[in-house]
Image: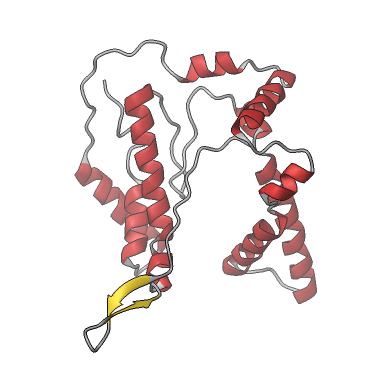
Amino acid sequence: DPQLHAHLLVANRVQRAGTDGRLGWGTLDGRVLYGEAKAAGMLGHAVLRSSMCRLLGVEWLPANSHGQAELVGVPDRLCALWSKRSAHLVEVADGVIAGKEQQLGRGLTGAERRTLTRHATLRTRQSKGEMAASGVPTGIDGLRARWAAEADDAGFRLRSVVEDTVPAHARERGPVGFDAVAVIEDALASLGESASSWTLPQARQHLLANLPVDLGRTG
């Protein structure tokens, strides 16, 4: 399914000075990196939205708690059509959670449900080799052709969807500002509602979640 995203590879090997002053090699402290992973992802989404607003003039629906937002102009039915992976994952995870609750004789906690969902995500993920072997295209040209065919079969013309999403003519506009104080106040309010104490990464997440989705828009 089409989903614009990026991957960042971080080498788990760094050069550092030892106690004797000589350079050596060691591994990163993954605990710190993992703690910042969600906030970093949310920041990446915000930067991507800002760039697309500025370069293409697109608009966004409100972001969810993970900092992700949908484009204005893409029909809900088309989004659902291109969410086959999510729909399958929910079905598998719900089955696993129900089985575990029956086994334990109690409802699962939120943390337990998230753990089982994460395991279901990994267990049902196909590699590119597996997809190619099953006839699913993995190259960009093949994927675009498949997406166009799926949309056409569902009664959508991709050109029309693009025209509804991306303004046809760019026009000179000035930058649109935002109230930074209001964003901070909203972030603090949502933090206070979620917990009595929080970490710096969690504060960053709430701050990014309260940023306007159209930071790069001009008007």
Q: Image check: 198 left or right of 142?
A: left
Task: Note whether 78 is above or below 15 in the view shown.
Answer: above
| Quarter of image, res 171 | top left
Q: Image check: 38 left or right of 134?
A: left
Residue 133 locus on image (x, y percent): 78, 45
The answer to whether one can see residue 209 in this image is no
The structure residue drawn at horizontal position 45% and vertical position 32%, both measured from the top left corner, is 61
Residue 205 locus on image (x, y percent): 37, 55
Residue 105 locus on image (x, y percent): 76, 74
The structure residue drawn at horizontal position 34% and vertical position 70%, both measured from the top left corner, is 197
In the rendered image, the residue lying farthest to the top is: 169
Task: Note whether 205 is above or below 22 in the view shown.
Answer: above
Task: Note whether 31 is above or below 152 in the view shown.
Answer: below
Task: Note whether 175 is above or below 84 in the view shown.
Answer: above
Residue 106 locus on image (x, y percent): 72, 72
The structure residue drawn at horizontal position 48% and vertical position 26%, both measured from the top left corner, is 72
Residue sitting nearer the eye, 103 or 46? 46
Residue sitting nearer the eye, 71 or 110? 71
The answer to whether one can see residue 216 in this image is yes
In the rendered image, the residue lying farthest to the bottom is: 20
**Which quadrant would the N terminus be assigned to in this image?**
top right
Tell how many labels. Answer: 0
Colour style of the rendered protein structure: secondary structure
The structure residue drawn at horizontal position 26% and vertical position 20%, both measured from the top left corner, is 219
